[in-house]
Image (tube, helix red, strand yellow):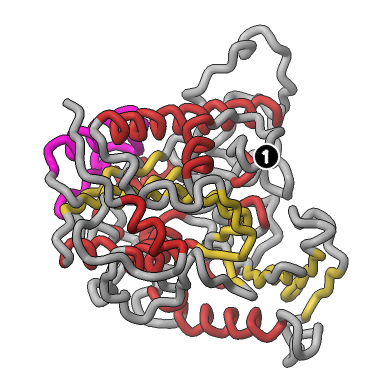
Amino acid sequence: MLVLRPSIGRAVGLLLLAGCSPPPSPRPDVVLITIDTLRYDHLSVNDPESPARTSSMDRLARDGVRFTQAWSPISVTGPAFASLLTGQRVGRHGMLMNLFRGGQPLADEHTTLAERLQEAGYRTAAFVSGFTLRAAVGLDQGFEAYDAPEGQQRRWSDRTVERAMAWLAESEEPAFLWFHSYDPHGPLKRWTLPNEETREWARAPTSTISPHQRSEDIVDPDYYKAKYALAVEFADAQVGRLLSYLDDSGRYEDALIILTADHGEGLDEREIWFEHGSLAYEEELHVPLLLKLPGTGRAGDVREAMVSLMDIVPTVTKALALAPLPNIDGRHLLTQSHAQLDGESSHCKPMEFLECAPQGSGGKMLVSRTFAETLLRKSTARGAVYERYDRRADPRERSPELVEVHSAEAQVPPLGPGSLIDPLESLRQERTRISELPGWEADDEADPAEIEKLKALGYLQ
């Protein structure tokens, strides 16, 4: 049944344009759409040469604001979403790694966007598709319904979106819905290419392809790239179903809709192929971000400022005239930006073709970025390796203009004071302090069934 409501979109949209808050009532629905492991360049609106065609996400870009320089603070799912939902940097909320690596769940002391919206009278629900977002991670705080695939590795998002739409159909306004697709996350075996059985794919007994992605002995990167693009298109189709539901129910125009990703995915750019979590380069931390305001405010705008997943929380609370969350590091997406953003990998994985050392959180890759440059620190057995990139000439960070090794015995970073070495060194010291806190040892009593799920998803070998 089509539900017709008086439009609040124009008033709220105009106030958002000015960076002001709208009146507290009536309030729009808030819809958070996240596509796990989605590269920035696989939205066709972001890159006309994208191998994936994303008509539904492109529609949101036409109806809202598209951000070209949005960054995740970390290249792994749980901690990235913790930053999104709290507005805090990784070092503040303390989720440096996934639980089974020795990381911690989001502590109850942190306030989430869902909790703030629930306090304001919103009905809140999350429908997530990956086992790594199960309730034990702590991101369920503030959601009256938190629907995750606890008994299986993953759920394809066509099933997840059906559950999300059924909840919306029964919920009175206003509603906060988090819909999460896990489809582009490997392994990619589910997706069948039109020429899969007839084409001669390159094969070899070994390769630098992440073990969880390997399909038989196929090592042809085009095979995996094409499957990844199919997975992105499938996720886009489910986004389209949700947007169509919002249209048909009369909720789309006035809704505040955010679409983004927790992190991207490496293809064949680096030493390990078709994997994320080990690195902190552009392809893993540069994420798509689309913001549709209530009404038609700023439809089709493109914002090139450096922004972060942390900025979603203060943008939403300001739009709804709610009290800000405590201790946030994010800024308003439409009126502020960051001169410099830090990022990191999850940890050093035990893979023979990765140079990082030591294994675990001590082998994290750390990075600081401005519009002009990237300074990246790798922890290796031969010492810290620093790489500097000119982001204007090399935005995809493929050709470092400087590579310098800092031996473990040296007391001062080799690049001298100033530039990005100071924030990068501060980030390193903070990570060291956190990783030395009690409780960071890996859980030797992990559930065997849980271990098997994580192995199937590529998190354990």
Q: What amino acid does circle 1 point to?
A: Asp
Residue 423 appearing in the image: yes
Which SS class for mark 1? loop
The structure residue drawn at horizontal position 71% and vertical position 41%, both measured from the top left corner, is 268
In the rendered view, would you say 1 is above or below 164? above
Q: Which residue is mark 1?
A: 47
Judging depth in this view, the residue of 30 and 383 nearest the camera is 30
In the rendered view, would you say 258 is above or below 340? above
Q: Position of residue 443 (x, y in %)?
A: 34, 63
The structure residue drawn at horizontal position 52% and vertical position 78%, both measured from the top left corner, is 431
The structure residue drawn at horizontal position 60% and vertical position 85%, both measured from the top left corner, is 426
Q: Is residue 159 magenta?
A: yes
On-image quarter of the N terminus:
top left
The structure residue drawn at horizontal position 40% and vertical position 82%, both measured from the top left corner, is 437
Residue 27 position by quadrant: bottom left
Q: Please state if 449 lies on the left or on the right of 240 as rendered.
A: left
Q: Position of residue 5 (x, y in %)?
A: 20, 41
| Count of numbered badges drawn on the protein | 1
Q: Position of residue 161 (x, y in %)?
A: 30, 33
Residue 108 position by quadrant: bottom left
In the rendered view, would you say 116 is above or below 34? below
Residues drawn in magenta: 144-171
Residue 381 appearing in the image: no
Q: Residue furthest right?
A: 401
Q: Is residue 98 magenta?
A: no
